[in-house]
Image (cartoon, rainbow, N blue to C red):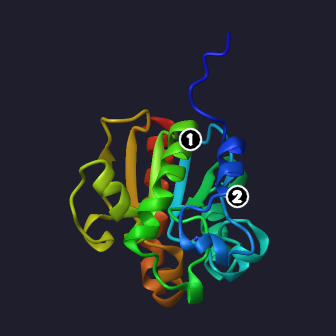
Amino acid sequence: MDLRTEPLLEEIAARIRSCTRCGLAALRTNAVPGEGLQHAPIMLVGEAPGEKEDDTGRPFVGRSGKLLTELLEAEGLKREDLFITSIIKCRPPDNREPTREEVRSCAPHLLMQLDSISPRVLVTMGNSAYELFSNTFYLPNKKVGEVRGKVFRLHSTTTSYLVPTYHPAGLIYNRKLIPDFQNDIRTAIRYSKGTV
Ligand code: URA
């Protein structure tokens, strides 16, 4: 008897690739479900795919993705050992911010991924990802600059901790924030290993 209740990541990705829940579906070249380990200890969530991601169907492969990959590797993390995605799975035109409606339509995909992976630590990168999860988990309604450096214990899911940090795109324009980002990644690693 199959007692599995959560669909596997590949099943969720197939749903995302055929999703028509919002108007972005008609504009996409490829949906970008995300990639990484089925049972990743850390899940990283950004905002939305850009042009390169839309072209390839892979998350964080453009300029901010290159920086993200470098900064993760500097902390000894390989992308393949994590799960990396965004709150929106299709590229908004001209890389505009996703609308509330688009975020709401896409959120079930992300929450299914979170349930399926059950990472020990969820890292939100940027304001949009923090805002979505702060509403979901009743965390302080603040901007990322005010909450980064903190670790939130989550009581409502199998995911234990949420670590908010900056979006890598912001780090390209403000490199002074990179050490804070790196500290947050180190924090996520520590909590993912239970060495806190
Ligand atoms: N920014 C994001 O938030 N996600 C991507 O996949 C690429 C850039």
Residue 34 visible? The answer is: no
* Amino acid type, residue under disc 2 in the picture: Arg
Q: Position of residue 75 (x, y in %)?
A: 59, 59
Indicate the quadrant where residue 135 lies.
bottom left
Q: Position of residue 196 (x, y in %)?
A: 38, 39
Q: How many marks?
A: 2
Residue 195 visible? The answer is: yes
With respect to residue 82, does 155 lie above or below? above
Q: Are marks 2 and 1 in contact (CB under 8 Å)?
A: no
**Mark 2 element type:** helix
In the foreground, 58 or 153? 58
Which residue lies at the image location 61% right of the left edge and 76% below the top edge? 91
* Amino acid type, residue under disc 1 in the picture: Pro
With respect to residue 121, does 106 lie above or below? below
Q: Earlier in the sequence, mark 2 or mark 1?
A: 2
User: Around disc 1, counting alpha carbons within 10 Å, would you say few (fewer than 14), some (14 to 19), or many (20 or more)?
Assistant: many
Residue depth check, mark 2 versus mark 1: number of the one nearer the observer: 2
User: Around disc 2, counting alpha carbons within 10 Å, would you say few (fewer than 14), some (14 to 19), or many (20 or more)?
Assistant: some
In the foreground, 127 or 67? 127
Residue extending furthest top?
1
In the foreground, 63 or 56? 56
Q: Position of residue 89 (x, y in %)?
A: 59, 64
Mark number for residue 17?
A: 2
Q: Position of residue 194 (x, y in %)?
A: 45, 35
Indicate the quadrant where residue 61 lies.
bottom right
Mark number for residue 129?
A: none
Which residue lies at the image location 65% right of the left edge and 70% below the top edge? 60
With respect to residue 132, does 55 lie above or below? below
Q: Image check: 147 left or right of 11?
A: left
Identify the residue position indicated by label 1 in the image: 41
Which residue lies at the image location 62% right of the left edge and 35% below the top edge? 7
Give how far apart the Cα atoms at labels 2 and 1 are.
25 Å
